Amino acid sequence: MRGWTRGFIAVVALASLLSVGLAHGAPPPKQQPVGGALLDDPHLTDTERKKLNEQCLEKEAAFGIERRPVALCRCLEQESVSALCLTAVKRYGYQSKYVPCYKQERTYWCGPAAVRQSLYWHKAVSGSAIALPSQTTLASRIGTTTSGSTTSGIARALNSYRGTFGTHHYVASDISNTSDPLGVFYNRIGAMLASKADGTVPIVLLQTSQLSRYRGHSSRHYVTISGIDDRSVPVRMRDVDPNWRVAYRGIYWDDVGCTTYNGLFRACYQADLEGSNLAMAW
Amino acid sequence: MKRLGVLCSAVAIIVLFVPGCSRPSVPDEARSDPEPPRLYQSVKTVTIPYRLFGHAKKAGGLLYVSVCGNDEGIIDRIITLDPETGEEEIVITSDNDIAWLEVSEEWIVWETNMDMYAQPRTGGERLLLGGVQAVFGPVLEGSLVAWMNRVDDDRYQLTVRDLNGGENRVIAENNHPGLYNNFVHIEGDRLLWTDIIDNTGFYRVASLRDGTIEDYPIQDTDFRFPGYAQLSGDRLYSINFDTYIEWDWTKQRFGYYSIPDGTFTALRDKNFIQAFRVSGDRVAILETGHRLTLMDAAASQQAEDISKAFGTIFDSLDCADSNTFVASLASKPGEPKKATLYLISVR
């Protein structure tokens, strides 16, 4: 294409842009993007990612979590099948770790609030008399900005209280980089909630539009997973949502779902795919 | 002539002549039962080159869709698509994630993760309706927008505003603000929402003419806390729950409350549903396994399996306008980014 032709097209495109702007009014002043979870983790270098992956594999091995496809999901594309997605595997039964629902104190502090929720359980089990850290302190330890938190920062902040509130060890991991994301998601959370001594209270990153109760409302958001029940279909998990708005905040039981059906796994998987920020601290 | 410019791109548009339109003729003597009438008029599919999108609405012959136009997973723009020509245009961009979109013939209303705005659909001044996450799930009919407005942390007010010069008008306080109670629905001059008062679940219907409110408590059932309610004449469709402490999405009853009878009738006894939408006398239901059912809200309650008709399940369900449901299916990770929107016209 000749240079003048490209120039002409550029002028037409610019005029088109301007006309759109004029036709629809001036845009509002620019704002700093605000969110609960960063899309990408700027601290996740190749070295750091490799280190986290090694920690993840070690922990999976320690808890007997195998990375091989398990017959958890019956994604039912065929019209004749109408059963639910996750079969009742009854591997973990009903597991519950009490954590309260703490309101996040700033619109972009779901990470610090979720960490405080998880630490509550560790403090209770450890019998520590030391007060829980404030969300301000936790935001600082995570490295939270107005754009939100990173999952690696969340795991780091949780581990910084090892010794203060017990002997827990969290690792930050993706799920989409495994051959069986649903099985990995289910087993990591189930194993952590079933383990009394060495367990954790996982924090997961969600794309809320993949949870039916949000009715299509889109946001990237951290919640604490404090319960699992796989005794019957559908397999459910309890998520403690610290949302700034009471309209969302609360304790819910949700279907786990799969890549095809809405639920906690699908919401986490979608959030994982969107950026390099890791999917879960467990 | 194909319009030049960076804002235009081709979208594939396929008009499906639905099976019902071209059902093979069957000799009368071979029929055992007459086929029930179809519950939809037509279905048109539109494929958009985006995997991640929010809501799709129809107005002025155009399809308005909030989409993720970047590699960052943020729904940052509202585009229009001309279903006839495939022409695409960006009409609104946002620095913050667009969480909600409503469009009428007159107005566009969108909620970001920070603010809510309104803008005349054909151009004009942009209005800021609420900021600092003060709004929740707006609905729009003509120039009337309604939403649950956050006053302070535990105080939400059902608020309406005529965008043609009106001011915010508080209809009622929400006694028990929470996710399931915060969705509102407009039908004509009636506004519906749900609430919990003294451990009793209520449907609340306000007249937008005189501001009066009729309350309909649910009693004599295990699932007595309604949420996500929508109006269809004298029927109040909702997803009902058995508790509001540790709400359990999988333990619900979808059905309707009959105002004349004062009773709730469950339409699903075992499985939970993912979503439903009401458009006049038609109800679309996204079932547990994401199959789509269309139902006649009238006495017959005839149902039609849309997933069977089109051989697919769907990711999401919404109302595109007062006559059209929109169900969508996005491509899988690793496949080219696209989503197919099924526009199901019911009248």
Image (tube, coloured by chain):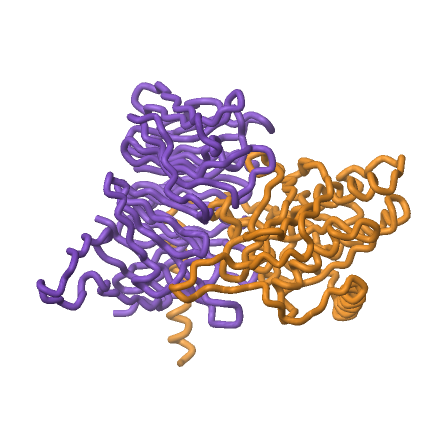
Chain colours: A orange, B purple
Residue extending furthest toward the bottom: A1
The percent position of residue B44, horizontal first and vertical second, equals 28, 60
Compared with residue A253, is residue A183 higher up or lower down, i.e. above or below? below
Depth order, front residue of A162/B70: A162
Which quadrant would residue A126 be assigned to in this image? top right
**Image quadrant of residue B306?**
bottom left
| Nearer to us in this view, A180 or A9 | A180
From the top left corner, tell me how far across and down residue B35 is, in percent: 18, 56
Q: Is residue A64 left or right of residue B192?
A: right
Number of numbered labels in the structure image: 0
| Towards the viewer: B219 or B135 | B219
Rendered residue at 25%/62% (across/down) = B84
Question: Residue B56: percent from the left, percent from the top?
Answer: 38, 52
Residue at 30 percent across and 46 percent down: it is B321
What residue lies at 50% left-to-right and 64% top-to-bottom?
A75
Q: Say whether residue B159 is left or right of residue A279.
A: left
Q: In x, y percent, where is residue B21? A: 18, 62
Q: In this view, does A34 lie above or below B7?
A: above
Residue B306 appears in view? yes
Q: Is residue A48 visible?
A: no
Position of the C terminus of chain A by quadrant: bottom right
Look at the picture and state if B195 lies above or below A45.
Answer: above
State the residue at coordinates (32%, 56%): B305
